[in-house]
Image (cartoon, grey):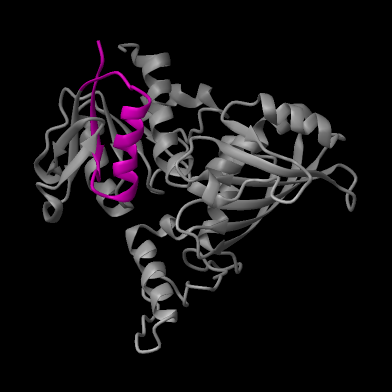
């Protein structure tokens, strides 16, 4: 016996990826519905070898459905997630709307699976920010061994994190560079993204941080440990898919780089590719389409007493969004609902 699953926002990048991953991982589905806004109504989307026609989110009745994977913005989520939850359908939300609500669990299954039982509070579970998700997968097993005091992270985030419009803007601006008669001014981003990097993701806050940087701080504390200090600089780069992060970690205890490498090799969701030779690391192009979070460049930081540096790369549409949501659904089914 399987589950009745709803994917909300099925025509977007993340929604389509959710459908792909549900099929790839052979999630036990008895029935599946693909929902979209009225402007996308009737659009066809793929689910394994099946083709689904999208239904109208505005008129959909969530009664009798087990789980709804939401891949729409916060405004739409604010309207429809409570309706789904009130109908008894557990919401797994990819927006930022519920991440910081103390009554709603924020889950990365490799890190805090025990938090799944908190879904009962509001029948809503939050999916973390894409840049946070891949980082905490690497931090948690190291924290369990040597207790992390402080993390300094610089991100190199792909344009797919800004949706289809971001990918289109990079593509159009890149073509325009080679065609002097064409001008594609910034629209989705604050400055030209083609052949450039932009040290701003989301809006600025009073302390000079951007909201994306703030998210990494708050979410890491909620998922891993509130005592960890985090400082982040988040940068948009001209890469289509795949977020990269340079992570500096300060521990309470000494942790040798070789032991850290062994710990990460054994940790769920992680693939260590770390050869000290040209090309002996993973770049975002290579991680696109993969489930794993890849760790490379593991080395001691000699400038502090108990420090390590590492390079962390993952497909942001997968582990940073759709895959993590499906893993939460698997965890919910396995630990709580127990149908499939």
Q: Position of residue 67 (x, y in %)?
A: 28, 27
**Residue nearest the observer in this picture, 35 or 166:** 166
Left or right of 196, for residue 44: left
Instruction: Give yes or no for residue 39 being in the magenta stretch.
Output: no
Q: Position of residue 205 (x, y in %)?
A: 53, 66
Magenta residues, start to end: 1-30
Q: Which residue is drawn at the image coordinates 42% and 35% (left, top)?
A: 323
Left or right of 280, for residue 304: right
Instruction: Give yes or no for residue 7 being in the magenta stretch.
Output: yes
Left or right of 109, for residue 38: left
For the N terminus, the quadrant is top left
Q: Which residue is drawn at the image coordinates 28% and 54% (left, top)?
A: 75
Residue furthest to the bottom in view is: 181
Picture quadrant of residue 190: bottom left
**Residue nearest the observer in this picture, 217 or 242:** 242
Q: Which residue is drawn at the image coordinates 25% and 45% (left, top)?
A: 9
Q: Is residue 156 above or below residue 287?
A: below
**Residue nearest the observer in this picture, 177 or 146:** 177
Picture quadrant of residue 120: top left
Whether residue 99 is visible here, answered yes or no, is no
Q: Is residue 255 above or below residue 248?
A: above
For the C terminus, the quadrant is top left
Picture quadrant of residue 55: top left
Q: Which residue is drawn at the image coordinates 28% and 46% (left, top)?
A: 77
Whether residue 50 is visible here, answered yes or no, is yes
Q: Position of residue 234 (x, y in %)?
A: 58, 60
Q: Position of residue 182 (x, y in %)?
A: 34, 85
Q: How many marks?
A: 0
């Amino acid at each position: 016996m399987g589950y009745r699953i709803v994917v909300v926002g099925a025509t977007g990048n993340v929604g389509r990826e959710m459908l792909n991953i549900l099929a790839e991982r052979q999630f036990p589905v008895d029935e599946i519905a693909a929902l979209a806004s009225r402007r996308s109504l009737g659009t066809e989307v793929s689910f394994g070898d099946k083709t689904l026609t999208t239904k109208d989110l505005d008129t959909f009745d969530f009664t009798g459905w087990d789980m709804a994977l939401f891949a729409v913005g916060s405004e739409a989520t604010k309207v429809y997630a409570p309706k789904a939850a009130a109908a008894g359908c557990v919401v797994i939300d990819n927006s930022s709307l519920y991440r910081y609500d103390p009554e709603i669990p924020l889950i990365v299954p490799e890190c805090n699976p025990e938090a799944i039982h908190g879904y009962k509070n509001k029948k809503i579970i939050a999916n973390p920010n894409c840049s946070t998700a891949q980082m905490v997968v690497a931090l948690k097993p190291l924290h369990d061994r040597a207790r992390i005091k402080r993390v300094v992270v610089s991100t190199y985030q792909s344009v797919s994190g800004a949706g289809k419009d971001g990918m289109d803007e990079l593509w159009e601006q890149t073509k325009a560079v080679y065609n002097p008669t064409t001008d594609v001014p910034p629209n989705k981003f604050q400055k030209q993204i083609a052949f450039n990097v932009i040290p701003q993701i989301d809006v600025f806050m009073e302390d000079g941080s951007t909201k994306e940087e703030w998210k990494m701080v708050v979410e890491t504390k909620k998922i891993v440990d509130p005592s960890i200090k985090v400082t982040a600089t988040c940068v948009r780069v001209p890469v289509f898919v795949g977020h990269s992060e340079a992570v500096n970690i300060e521990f309470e205890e000494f942790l040798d780089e070789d032991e850290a490498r062994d710990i990460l090799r054994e940790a769920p969701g992680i693939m260590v590719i770390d050869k000290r030779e040209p090309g002996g690391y993973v770049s975002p192009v290579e991680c696109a389409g993969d489930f794993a979070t890849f760790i490379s460049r593991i080395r001691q930081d000699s400038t502090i007493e108990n420090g390590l540096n590492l390079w962390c790369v993952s497909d942001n549409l997968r582990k940073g969004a759709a895959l993590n949501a499906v893993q939460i659904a698997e965890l919910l089914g396995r630990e709580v609902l127990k149908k499939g």
